[in-house]
Each structure stands twice: as C-alpha cells, then as structure tokens.
C-alpha cells in the first residue's frame, strides 16, 4: 500500500507472539476488550460480525464517559490484513462525519513473532493532524504493548 | 436492507432483459459507456477492477466539461448486488467530501426479465435533498431506460 504522509498515520511494532494469536486477539470481542484502548480506559461491549460489511461496534468507557462507536469491516484477509472504519455502519449506511479508516497488517517476523503495522487513513490533512495531536503514536503504541502482553498470556 | 427515507433515495424498475445480461452491462467498461449517464452526456473512459476495494473510475463528458470520478467497490454478490462509492479511491484512501454510496440490486422477475433497484445512500438529509434536486429520479430513470435498450440490443 502506498501511504500518503499528508493524511495517513502509521506505526510498526514487533510483537513477541505468533501471528495467528495476534489475529485471534483482533477478531474476537472477548479478546479485544483486553487491549483495544489504553488502560485505565476500557471496552465495555464489543460486537463483531467478521465479514465485509459486517459490524464492528463498541462501547468504551473513557474517564467514566460512555462512548459508542459503530463501524464495519471493509476488507478481511485471514491472518494478514484487517481494514475497518467508522465511515459506515452496517448496511453501508454512511456516517455524517467519519473519523478514520484503519488498516491493521500482520506478518511473520521470521522469529516466531509478528510484525504488526497499524495505519490510520484520514479524509484530510486537518483530520490527520487532529488524530496526531490526540496522541496517535503514544495511544496506538500502548495498545500494541497491551496486545503483546495479553497475547503472551494466552500462550 | 432497511432504507432510511431521511438520507436514502431509491428507484425500482422492471427491465425486459435477463439478469445475467444486466449484470454484465453493469460490470464491464465497454458496456457501462452505453448507458451510465443520461445522453447526450457520455462516459469517455471507465476502469473497473471488480473486487472488493477495486477501482471503479470514470471520466465523463457533461456538456463538454470533463468530470473525473474515482471510486471503489464495497460489495459484490455475483449477479445480484453491487455496492460502490466515491467515499474511497483504491487502497482505501478516504475522499474529502464523498457524495454517495450506491447499491444496485438485480432479481429475476419470474418472466425472463429483471427487477432492478438502484439505491443511493447519503451522509446527511442535506446531501440526499441535494441529490434529489439534481434530478435523481429522472436521471436514474433515464439510465434504467438506456440500460434496458442497450441490454436488449445485446441479446
């Protein structure tokens, strides 16, 4: 994929857990709750219908405030690539003001671990900047660390 | 699919040509050029990569003005359902200001013909209204008539 530095943000990490486990973590509601938002924020509810156009909905608790998020999967390459967005809710209903499209990529690192790349694509340079200012790099980095810890606890 | 009358526009027509032919017309650049815009406007170029996330790009000539449009397919159910949008270009690059998401449905009408339903979903009631004011019903109706004439010429 060709990135656009004006509108995209991306983060690559090596995770010391097998690709199949990381994929399972990313596609199972019970697992998602354990790493998807930086603690002490948390995921209270998560619904996944893992097919193109299927729902990826969530209720998060951020400093005691409930935040509902609705999204869909755009592309699913088993074990390798997951694309989802809040641009649509189920049934291809367009959102008024979508935030981002996320592309999560998983590759074997040749050492039993996983090269994990999380990319957020935005509609405009302003949206990208706003996401960076919100703490994209720290936030998604913490999520990657939480994911590694949780995935290793499953082994 | 549950429609939302506040943001969706839809049109259903019976077309006197087999579903397989209508599907072929909608998914082949050389066919698309013959019906996709109300004449005398025309399609000068069309590129189709018929897979989820694949491009559906077009150059149109409207009153001598060249209009480029980039889009992707979101869902493809062979012979039955085609979902595309200008919300993304290839690679899941979000558009700044997308116009609509189109859902085209094809069903056998039991009499050798096709029940053809074209739905446009919009981000807001204002976008829906603007599309209606631009002449959604007349325009998409003319396209359906052109499609029927062209499909019958292929038989």
Image (cartoon, coloured by chain):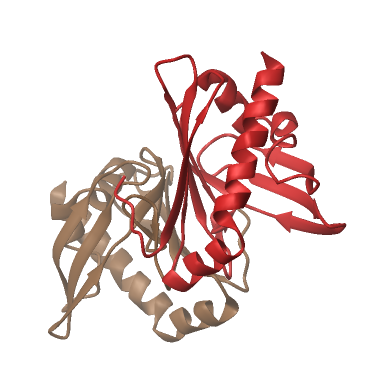
Chain colours: A red, B brown
Q: Is residue A75 left or right of residue A20?
A: left
In-front residue for pair B137/A91: A91
Q: Residue furthest right?
A: A64
Rendered location of residue A43, percent (x, y): 77, 44
Q: Position of residue B132 (x, y in %)?
A: 47, 81
Q: Residue at x 34, y 54 (%)?
A: B72
| Residue A1 visible | yes
Q: Which residue is rendered at x = 51% and y = 78% of the image?
A: B127
Q: Is residue B84 left or right of residue A88?
A: left
Pick the front one: A49 or B32: A49
Task: Give the image quarter of residue B20.
Answer: top left
Residue at 69% across, 26% down: A150
Q: Position of residue B71 (x, y in %)?
A: 32, 59
Query: What x and y, as percent, mark residue A143?
Result: 64, 41
Q: Is residue B119 above or below residue A90?
A: below
Horizontal relation, residue B41 to residue A33: left or right: left
The reply to whether residue A27 is in sight is no
Residue at 12% from the left image edge and 84% from the top image edge: B64
Locate residue A141: give its quadrant: top right
Pick whichever, B119 or A120, lies toward us.
Answer: A120
Front residue (pair A15, A57):
A15
**Side of B21 relative to A3 (left or right):** left
A117 relative to B61, above or below:
above
**Numbered label tally:** 0
């Amino acid at each position: 994929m060709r990135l656009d530095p004006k509108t995209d943000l991306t983060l690559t990490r090596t995770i010391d857990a097998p690709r199949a486990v990381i994929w399972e973590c990313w596609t199972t509601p019970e697992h998602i709750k354990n790493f998807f938002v930086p603690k002490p924020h948390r995921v209270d509810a998560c619904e996944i219908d893992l097919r193109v156009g299927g729902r990826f909905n969530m209720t998060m608790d951020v400093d005691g405030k409930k935040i509902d998020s609705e999204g869909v999967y755009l592309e699913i390459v088993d074990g390798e690539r997951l694309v989802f967005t809040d641009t649509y809710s189920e049934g291809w209903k367009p959102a008024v003001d979508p935030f981002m499209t996320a592309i999560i990529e998983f590759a074997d690192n040749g050492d039993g671990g996983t090269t994990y790349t999380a990319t957020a694509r935005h509609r405009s340079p302003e949206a990208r900047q706003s996401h960076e200012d919100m703490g994209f790099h720290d936030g998604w980095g913490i999520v990657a660390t939480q994911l590694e810890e949780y995935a290793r606890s499953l082994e």
